[in-house]
Image (tube, grey):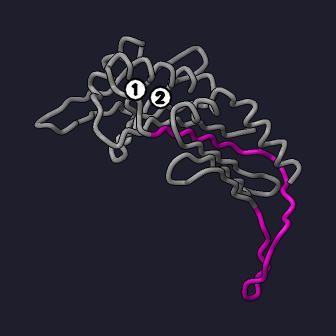
Amino acid sequence: MYGLSIYFWAVYSVDVDLPSFLNKLVGLGYTVAEAHYSAGTLSVKYLPDGSLATKKTDTGTITMLYDEGRKAIGVVGNNRDLVSLGVAEMTRALNEARIPEPVMTELYISFGEAITLSPKRGMKLLDYELKEGGTILYWGDPQSETVYLTVSPSGPNKVVVVLLVRGNWGLTTMFLNNFSTVVNEILDELKRM
């Protein structure tokens, strides 16, 4: 496995008390952006790297983001332990700032894998022979709770795997907490394809 990225988003769709949330993160050792309300409008001065907050640990850096359009707070890391710690600290800061649970959470996991997929289907289009090169699998309703898996070729004998889990806090954190099992099950199934 290479190129691992993990994103966890708490999607609110409405403004939250971001200044209070950031104050709580400072108490947890984060370097944070500046945020304040002016005439009822939230203004954020992001950190130089464009993030909302960062914290260096012995194993890497936890980065928090803010999506102004979706009113979502995200945690980014390159391993499960960093993201899990970031989500736990985000949860603590949200609770201490008296910000309610989000309406939706999302977990994105992407990585590359050296593997060869055997095409099972294909079709001819004009003078071109098209063959199946990846797959899309899903569970649930894309507009609410869903688990969505894509496998796409990225070069000779290489694929990119993207897993999206969208739903309530319990669903997304279950997948994050079982990260190793989830990745191993995906890889085992890919080897059988």
Question: Going 56% across and 30% down the picture, which residue do you hit?
Answer: 170
List the residue tagged with mark 1: 53
The location of residue 28, given as percent across then percent down, is: 42, 13
Magenta range: 104-133
Residues at circles 2 and 1 in contact by the CB criterion of under 8 Å:
yes
* Vertical comparison of 25 with 18: above or below: above
Question: Going 80% across and 42% down the picture, which residue do you hit?
Answer: 187
Q: Quadrant of the C terminus?
A: bottom right
Residue 121 lies in the magenta-colored region: yes
The location of residue 73, given as percent across then percent down, is: 41, 34
Give the amino acid type for the residue marked by disc 1 in the picture: Ala
Residue 130 lies in the magenta-colored region: yes
Disc 1: CA contacts within 10 A as few (<14), some (14-19) or many (>=20): many
The answer to which of 145 and 157 lies nearer the viewer is: 145
The prevailing secondary structure element of the residues shown in magenta is strand
Mark 1 element type: strand
66 relative position to 146: left or right: left
List the residue tagged with mark 2: 63
